[in-house]
Amino acid sequence: MKILLATDGSEHSERAARFLTKLDFTKDDEIMVFHALSWAPVISEWELV
C-alpha cells in the first residue's frame, strides 16, 4: 500500500495523521508526507544586491 499524507498544520491534517497510526502496515507499505505552506518567500537576484 502506498499512502500520501498531505499536511498543512490544520486540524484536518492532524486527524488524518492520527488515522494513519491506527492502520496495520507491512514492511512493504510506503507513506510519503507532503507538507504544504501557504506562502514561501521569493527573493530575486536584484534584492540580494
Image: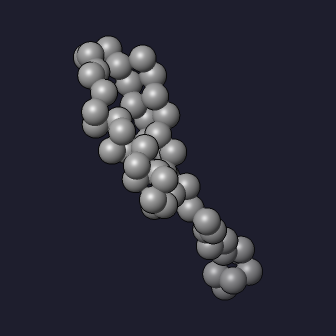
Q: Nearer the viewer, residue 17 or 40?
A: 17
Quadrant housing the N terminus: top left
Q: Residue at x 71, y 74 (%)?
A: 44
- 27 vs 11, left or right, is left
Q: Quadrant of residue 38?
A: bottom right
Q: How is the image coloured?
A: one colour
Across and down, in percent, residue 15 comes to: 40, 49
| Residue occupying image coordinates x 35% and y 19% | 29
Residue 32's quadrant in the figure? top left
Which of 42/32 is in front?
A: 32
Question: Is 16 located above or below residue 24 in the figure?
Answer: below
Looking at the image, how many numbered discs can be counted on the residues?
0
Q: In the rendering, at what x and y percent does residue 37 appear?
A: 56, 62
Q: Position of residue 34 (x, y in %)?
A: 49, 45
Q: Is residue 44 above or below residue 36?
A: below
Residue 43 in the image: x percent, y percent? 66, 74
